[in-house]
Amino acid sequence: MRWLATWALIYFVITLGSAFLHQCGHGVGARIEGMRISTGFASAGAPQRRPSDADYRDPMPVEGTLTLHGILGPGVNWLLGIVAVVLLHRARRPTLGALALAAAAIANAGIRLFPISKTLVTIFTGRLFLDDEATWGIAGSGDLRFPITVARLNEQIARDAGVFTHHAWTFFWPAVSLAISLTVMVAAYPKALALFAPRLPTRLERVLFALMPFLVTPAILVAAGWLDEHVRLNW
């Protein structure tokens, strides 16, 4: 069980670190493009603001097209996930380093799979969720003038989400990110399970090893939410 506890801790820490780097990617891109934003562990918002502030996100611009500050967030996760899974496949022994590589690959794939899955699910609920990749093609709808603020975008979603869901460009970048993230996830999981099987002698331990990223996720969400409120960078 010691390896399971270690796996849980490493996955927890690396996921939080990857989420922070994702937001830093947005911040670096914004700085290069001359924008002012603040970033934390789970979101980006207006400078000098925190998620608990009423005007945290509302004035933020949404371009509806691919931008540097937009792509550098998910781009960090794609890069970290790809590099980690490549190095993981070169590992020959079940070391702590290999465990960290497995965590980095699975975590960074999951960081993109979660919001994309949420977007796909909300299409059918009438409360469309748009974030990162899902906003990069919405200007192609032709029904709104971009850039617009987050507040206006949310008003439009509440009024008629079909403006976005009826256009293929809304789904192009989420599909690209989904393909990258699923490839990393599918490549990482079997390798990690095979590599660490000798350290997990019972069937229960192997099942828990496979499920650990999902079991730890609630704690990660709570920690990321708290850190997002209290640890902010202004770019």
Image (cartoon, rainbow, N blue to C red):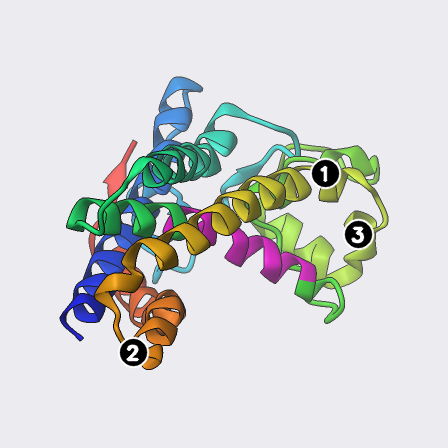
Report the side of 92 relative to 133 (left or right): left
Q: Quadrant of residue 233?
A: top left
Q: Residue at coordinates 65% horizontally, 30% vertically from top-left?
A: 65
Magenta-highlighted residues: 107-120
Of badges 1 and 3, nearer the viewer stands 1
Indicate the amino acid at tag 3: Thr
Q: Residue at coordinates 48% horizontally, 46% vertically from top-left?
A: 187
- Give the x, y percent position of residue 180: 56, 39
Assign a secondary structure to mark 1.
helix
Tell me if residue 119 is in the magenta stretch: yes
- Give the x, y percent position of residue 54: 41, 60
Q: Residue at coordinates 22% horizontally, 46% vertically from top-left?
A: 93
Is the residue marked by circle 1 packed among few (<14), some (14-19), or many (20+) residues within 10 Å?
A: some
Q: Along the polypeptide, which appears first: circle 2 or circle 3? A: 3
Of badges 2 and 3, nearer the viewer stands 2
Circles 2, 3 touching at the beta carbon (< 8 Å) = no
Is the residue marked by circle 2 packed among few (<14), some (14-19), or many (20+) residues within 10 Å?
A: few
- Give the x, y percent position of residue 3: 18, 66
Magenta-colored segment: predominant secondary structure: helix
Q: Quadrant of residue 135?
A: top right
Residue that numbered label 1 is attached to: 172
Q: Quadrant of the C terminus?
A: top left
Tell me if residue 158 is in the magenta stretch: no
Indicate the amino acid at tag 1: Phe
Indicate the amino acid at tag 2: Thr
The image shows residue 158, relative to residue 38, as above or below, that is: below
How many numbered marks does the figure carry?
3
Q: Which mark is residue 202?
A: 2
Residue that numbered label 3 is attached to: 165
